[in-house]
Image (cartoon, grey):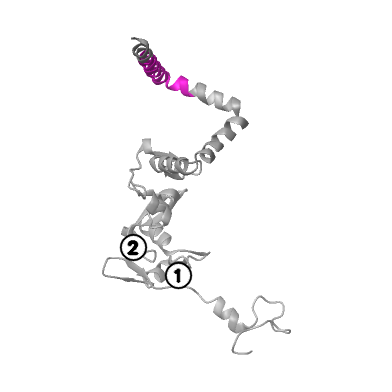
């Protein structure tokens, strides 16, 4: 058999699973117990991490064969030293070292909490308390989109104001188009707003007519002074 590989022999081993007795012996050799291979596959480093020195997944997590399939070495460590992993939870590294298998550096989190506890762009953005212009992400100043994306209301107002200053006609056109396409929806939104903010709407009306009466009175006074001899 060539030294570079093996292939099915057409005679004695044609109907067997392995190409030769050598390959069969290599595959069927007795493996050590998973815990024994686990104990010989890590090194303790200065910061207390148990650095996995055997095979790794492409994601950087340690890989260990438990007798049936390859699993994460950190998951095996958690199950062996701490307990079972509940359904819907994942093992998170407190030390942020994916190759660490120290059970004291592991904890159970939900998938969403695990992502937000990491160093991914989504996790870093979630922990931000201010936007790029320094406005605080308070409940009153934060708009949440349907996909969970958040935007700063103050920045949106600044962009809209700048757009109206640059091209006022074009800035008003989207609103006109929306009201033309959805007249009943616009009326319903106005009714809902008045129902939610009835006192505020009435106060605005009172302020408006107070200013209107004041302007009418001033106008009459000016006309009276102009007509008086």
Q: Where is residue 149 shown, x and y percent of the image?
A: 46, 45
Name the secondary structure under disc 2: loop
**Residue nearest the viewer, comparing 159 with 10:** 159
> Mark number for residue 102?
2
Q: Is residue 151 above or below residue 38?
A: above
For label 1, the residue is 56
Q: Is residue 207 magenta?
A: yes
Horizontal side, residue 50 vs residue 111: left or right? left
Magenta stretch? 193-219
Mark 2 nearby-residue class (10 Å; few <14, some 14–19, many ≥20):
many
- Rendered residue at 42%/61% (across/down): 76
- Rendered residue at 50%/74% (across/down): 30
Q: Residue furthest front?
A: 229
**Residue nearest the viewer, comparing 33 with 110:** 110
Q: Is residue 55 above or below residue 124?
A: below
Q: Residue furthest left?
A: 46
Say if residue 48 shows up in the picture: yes
Quarter holding the C terminus?
top left
Horizontal side, residue 177 vs residue 33: left or right? right
């Amino acid at each position: 058999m060539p030294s570079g590989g093996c292939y099915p022999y057409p005679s004695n081993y044609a109907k067997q699973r392995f190409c030769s007795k050598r390959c069969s012996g290599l595959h069927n050799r007795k493996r050590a117990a998973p815990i024994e291979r686990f104990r010989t596959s890590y090194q303790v480093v200065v910061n207390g991490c148990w650095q996995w020195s055997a095979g790794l997944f492409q994601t950087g997590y340690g890989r260990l064969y438990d007798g049936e399939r390859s699993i994460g070495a950190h998951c095996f460590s958690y199950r062996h030293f701490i307990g079972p992993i509940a359904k819907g939870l994942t093992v998170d590294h407190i030390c942020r070292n994916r190759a660490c298998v120290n059970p004291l550096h592991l904890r159970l989190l939900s998938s969403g909490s695990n992502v937000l506890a990491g160093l991914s762009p989504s996790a870093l953005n979630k922990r931000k308390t201010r936007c790029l212009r320094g406005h605080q992400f308070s409940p009153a100043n934060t708009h949440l989109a349907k996909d969970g994306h958040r935007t700063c209301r103050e920045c949106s107002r600044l962009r809209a104001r700048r757009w109206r200053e640059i091209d006022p006609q074009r800035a008003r056109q989207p609103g006109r188009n929306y009201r033309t396409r959805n007249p009943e929806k616009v009326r319903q939104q106005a009714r809902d707003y008045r129902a939610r903010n009835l006192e505020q709407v009435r106060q605005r009306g009172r302020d408006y007519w107070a200013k209107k009466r004041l302007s009418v009175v001033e106008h009459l006074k000016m006309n009276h002074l102009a007509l008086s001899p």
